[in-house]
Image (cartoon, helix red, strand yellow):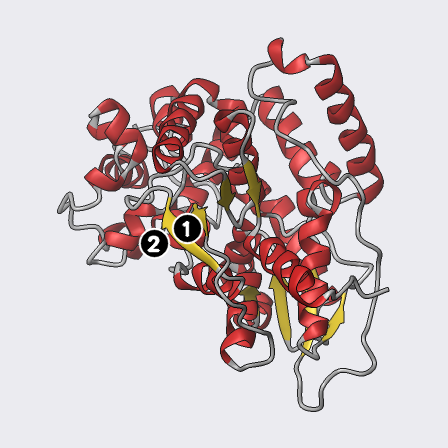
Amino acid sequence: MTTSWRTDFAPTVAELNTCVACGLCLPHCPTFRLTGLETASPRGRIAAMRAVGEGVLEVDADFEEAMTFCLNCRACEAVCPSLVPFGRMMEGARAELAASRPSWRRRARHFVLGRILSDRRSMRVLSDFLRLGQRLRFDRIVPGMASRGLRGLRPLGTTRRRPTARSGSPRIGLLVGCVMDRWFAGVNQAAIDLLELAGCEVEVPADQVCCGALAVHDGAVGAGRRLAQRNVSAFAEVDVLVATAAGCSAHLKGYEQLLAQGSDIAAKARDVTEIIAGLIDEGRLPVLASRGEEVVVHDPCHLRHAQRITAAPRRILAAAGYETVDADPEGLCCGAAGIYSLLRPATSHQLGKRLAAAVHRHGGRVVASANPGCEMQLRAHLGTGFRVVHPVELYLEAIRSRNDIHSTP
């Protein structure tokens, strides 16, 4: 067997050689925890990648199973002493799968991820269809699809600027995103209101598109690059690029791996929790007195593991007057993982139930999470009586309730 990589995005020899097979990643890998199989561990998957790269194994059904069973949560990266870039390697391996094992299902997914999500009119139609599916309870026919707690189906406007920004403030561009724009517009609006309250100039370019994370995670690297190139152009004039979804901010910071000319935008990309926590520390946003209430904090994988951001959401909630308690100190993936809940509903359900059980043990009824997929997963498994919300929304609500500050017109 003489298999060789077919794409320029495949795992490199240098990347593969960073793994010394020490096994420290094993206890932190959700799929290894569930199965106990070496092939379901980061170490085992890297061994399979190396074997394919050396021509020992082929890109066959077994290789596909090992790569697609992974949630790409990157928990292994956070504990790896060798700094193995596992997330990048997994995206490269899936790009190889797309090139070597094409199928109509994969082509259909890549069309949706690369084309539909980047078009606002198409997203409006898709959102209306999913909202209808919720009403008709189609989720009972297609488990895990429609009833993800869609809310706030009102997209943000296009370009907007604040001419009275504080002198010396950076010009901030907001990535509204595909899912965030249509299903979580309230989070985007809360981010704008808080940034403007702090005296920042905020721009929402009309020609921006989906960040491309979902496409690249599924191996559609060509589509991901096209989307990245459009965003590089759309946000060329801003000083800071803010995303309100942890998955988006993590992907933006990885544009330099996708595009040579993306390094500039990658360097100025920030998660909204980073920016708002920084403005609080600078005294440009208020710190409110204690409310005597607890919030259960869930750390999205692409915030905690990929970006190593854990303090910022808690800083925001503390400034809102809340006491915080961790949903899961281990930081195990909730099972949403982009489109994983659609492709692997049984595994996703197992992990979702585990996280929901952890939240139930705490007894808190308000859960803060900074990623839309995680929020939908939590809502689907927690049941009624719980509120799942982004930290910036809770913070803005607290400010308004104390100061009667209303949304900027």
* Pointers 2 and 1 in contact (C-beta within 8 Å): yes
The image shows residue 207, relative to residue 361, as above or below, that is below
The image shows residue 37, relative to residue 86, as above or below, that is above
Mark 2 to mark 1 CA distance (whole Å): 6 Å
Q: Secondary structure at mark 1?
A: helix
Q: Mark 2 = which residue?
A: 85
Q: Is residue 131 visible?
A: yes
Q: Quadrant of the N terminus?
A: top left
Name the amino acid type tagged 2.
Pro
Q: Between residue 106 and residue 354, name the one nearer to us.
A: 354
At 25% across and 23% down in the image, what residue appears? 35
x then y, percent, for residue 334 = 42, 35
Q: Mark 1 = which residue?
A: 88
At 50% across and 33% down in the image, what residue appears? 378
The local crowd at label 1, few if under 14, some if 14 to 19, many if 20 or more residues have their Cα within 10 Å, is many
At 70% across and 77% down in the image, what residue appears? 200
167 displayed left or right of 271: right
